[in-house]
Image (cartoon, grey):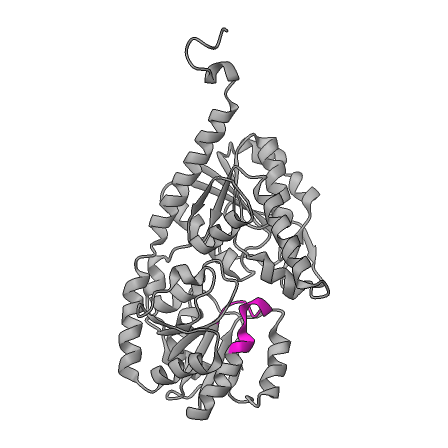
Amino acid sequence: MNILFVSDVFFPRVNGVSTSIDTFRREFLAQGHKVWLIAPDYFIPSEDENHILRVSSHYLFMDPEDRLMRYGHALRHLDQLRRENFDIIHIQTPFVAHYLGLRLSRELGIPRVETYHTHFEEYFYHYLPLLPRPVMRYLARWFARHQCNQLQGLIAPSRPMLDVLRHYGIPTPAEIVPTGLEPDRFELGDGDDFRAKHGIPAQRPVLLFVGRVAHEKNIGFLLKVTERVRQDIPDVLFVIAGEGPAQESLRSDTQRLGLEGHVQFIGYLDRNTELRDCYRCADLFVFSSRTETQGLVLLEAMAQAVPLVSTAEMGAKSVLSEGAGVHIASEDVEEFAGKAIALLRDPELRRALGEAGQAYARQWSAAGLAHRMLEFYRKTIAEAAHRALPSATLAPAGEADN
């Protein structure tokens, strides 16, 4: 199969969408398929630029980590794209990439599907705070219906995310396809080396968050948890690995809560080297996002045999199972901190929970989930071809000439 991905983000920009694209792309190639990707030019190449069409882009004042593709510049490559004879377009993000994907689908005469990676009700509220929440909710739902109804197929990373879209009244044919874990995610990192590099004492208890440092990730709640844990475990350290627009706000919260020396911002890490080491340096992975459509970092932490304490909202609910690598808590500081404290005080309990999580994470095979995605592509292509047949061809025998 010949597949065209279109996305507003990709490496070197690090986030869950980039990781998902890279994982499926690698698995499709390993299974003998061909994959092209259209993505913004960040003026820093990723590790593998093969069959990646980088489009001229410009700076975003409100989100300086990202770049906005120039729609017209992408269309300059239309003749080249026609020669590739793609079977399907898979749109990954809802901004320029969505409308570019629609245009390319029409120009190339092939069906289009899209993965709904972001729960926009919470996202819009944080990034457009001047409008009342009911207005933001209405706009988010209208936006989702408007875009999803323009597709031939819709992919949701989890059952809760698909349930939200169905509740919005979106009837587009859909499939649930999470992003899986590749085998190398289970190769254990060197936590001791990571601690040494970042000045973290070998015996210091470490809580870890990995991900985009964004308002919708609810990291402020984890700072409050850290403050409560410190009352029982005075030398606890909360490591935040990632970058994003909430970073300065969280630094201010760290000072306000008196947590200087108990919170360490690490920044982005290379996924193939340092990130695994970072997971392994932690005694406990903590997570409290309300908007996650899947929560891939939860599985990545499990793959490194790191035990978790996490809330189970939205897509995280599909990933997490109590006792399978995680103790699930509500968004209550006392309850969440109590479960973290109990694990930090009991090395054997941490070890057993981490091993259970690693065994559980092996069920999320990237190869198997790539196969499921390919089957959805085939179904979508077949249905699009069926709809394109002349009406006389579709008529039952004996009726075509009536």
- Image point (68%, 58%), residue name: 135
Q: Position of residue 33 (x, y in %)?
A: 41, 40
In the foreground, 110 or 229: 229
Q: Is residue 64 visible?
A: no
Q: Residue, x 46% and y 18% (percent of image)?
A: 394
Judging depth in this view, the residue of 261 and 35 nearest the camera is 261
Foreground of the two, 395 or 368: 395
Pinpoint residue 36: horizontal percent, then vertical percent. Answer: 51, 43
Q: Residue at x 35, y 61 (%)?
A: 184
Q: Quadrant of residue 235?
A: bottom left
| Residue 15 sits inside the magenta stretch | no
Name the quadrant containing residue 355.
bottom left
- Residue 213 inside the magenta-drawn segment: yes
Relative to 58, say whether 91 is above or below.
Answer: above
> Which quadrant holds the N terminus?
top left
Number of callouts in the render? Answer: 0
In the image, is 182 to the left or to the right of 85?
left
In the image, residue 283 sits, relative to residue 61, either above or below, namely below
Quarter of the rendering containing residue 216: bottom right
Q: Which of 279 and 49 lies nearest the eye of the viewer?
A: 279
Q: Position of residue 168 (x, y in %)?
A: 56, 49
Q: Residue at coordinates 47% horizontally, 51% vertically from top-left?
A: 163
Q: Is residue 73 visible?
A: yes
Q: Residue 279, relative to residue 337: is it above or below?
A: above
Question: The magenta stretch spans which residues?
Answer: 210-221
Residue furthest to the top in view is: 401
Q: On the picture, is 395 further left or further right than 42?
A: left
Q: Position of residue 253 (x, y in %)?
A: 60, 82
